Amino acid sequence: MSEQAVEPLLASAIWQARQTSDASRDGQNADRLSTSCRSIDDVILPGLSYGEGGLCALSHESDAGVQELLFAFLASHLMRTSGDVTVIDSRGFDLSGLYSYIIAKLSLQPHVNPNLPPRNLNTEAKSLLERVRIMRVFDVEGLFEALSEVRSTFHGIHVDGNTGSDTIAGLRSTIPDSQMAIDAPENDDLLAERAAAKHVVAEEAPISLSTTPHLLILDELSSLLMPIQRTDPTHASALLSTLMRSLRHLAQANNTACIIASSAQSARASSPKRGPLERNSAPPPPSPSIFASCTARPSFAKAMDAADVHLLVHRLPKTVEDARAVYGVSASDTHGFGEAESSVPPSKEKRRRDVKWVNCVEVLRDRHGGRKGRFAFFAVDRRGLVTDGL
């Protein structure tokens, strides 16, 4: 058997092949929403849908880079399509952060025509921001009013901004003055639920489908529904079901991708408490994550699973040493992690300060594909951009 020398490959040829592959991949998925981060896009391949199957739930830990992830979806949509973006904001949208993110993404694009004057990234970023609408809401009533306005914008119908308020005022006027308890939280929830039902009935009329892709981001659902969830879970569940139906119909009828961001609750391990009441307390439900160390649980797990795609964003220790520092594994109790050290270990506080983390996104549910169980790691670099985590 004769041996043949392996022909070397030029680095330029490898780089050109990679660029061609990326361009072909982007062309095939041009009608899908992505992040421009390879590791994340591989998980959600071929991307989040516009229209049918376009309802995405995004449960997240607060410190897991979810804001930058939303920026990545938003910037990718603005730079790859001509569609608008609507952000329904309940916690204070970081517009300056989005502006900086877009500037950083634009700076990565090559200046292909040297005959043209130098690019003005600020002007380009401002032109993209002209397609972003931010609607600030403070309660569930305002949320459904905002959705009604978004729907009217798609259909080219002018709707008075006080329509939802007038509806609530009309409902209040039917209650006798003797019932001053109308200001109680449970009554407010009931009125909001009726107003929400009114919006859903109104949207059932047949409408023409839009060909321009749009993006709708709801940030953040937990701050709106958690107060109702604590006082009356039944009303919260009804409102959430109404909201999911409304968003699904809006996405399908208007070629829209809807992302619902909702915080996840983390149940960290604590020292056992003694007492007779602890014996009867039910253990918390297990985390849906495939990682045993992840304790994040979506706040509205059952309702979020009704979405077409349900993503969980959390963070994990990056290395074995980081895991030891976080989960309290001593140097002498290695369990296969390495040799025990003879030196005195540093304090727990110092070890936690030195821990390095990596963000993780998992697919908890996928109604229309086989992406369930996929996961990827990502990081946020110094420019604030979402990049591969490992």
Image (spheres, rainbow, N blue to C red):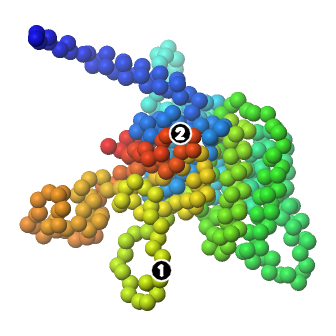
Disc 1 is placed on an element classified as loop
Q: How many marks are shown on the rendered structure?
A: 2
The kind of residue tagged 2 is Gly
Q: Residue 120 bears which disc, if any?
A: none
Left or right of 318: which side holds 266? right
Q: Which residue corresponds to the image point at 62% horizontal and 34% vertical from the top-left?
A: 127
Q: Position of residue 236 (x, y in %)?
A: 67, 66
Q: Is residue 296 visible?
A: no
- Quarter of the image containing the C terminus? top left
Quarter of the figure with residue 347: bottom left
- Quarter of the image containing the N terminus? top left
Q: Residue 281 bears which disc, if any?
A: 1
Q: Which residue corresponds to the image point at 44% horizontal and 31% vertical from the top-left?
A: 108
Seen as rendered, the residue at the extreme front is: 1
Proximity of marks 1 and 2: CB atoms separated by less than 8 Å? no
Quarter of the figure with residue 367: top right
Please report whichever mark, 1 or 2, sits nearer to the chain's N-terminal start. Answer: 1
Is 26 located above or below residue 273 in the figure? above
Quarter of the figure with residue 157: top right
Q: Which residue corresponds to the image point at 77% horizontal and 69% vertical from the top-left?
A: 190
Left or right of 2: which side holds 96? right
The kind of residue tagged 1 is Ser
Disc 2 is placed on an element classified as loop
Q: Residue 369 bears which disc, if any?
A: 2
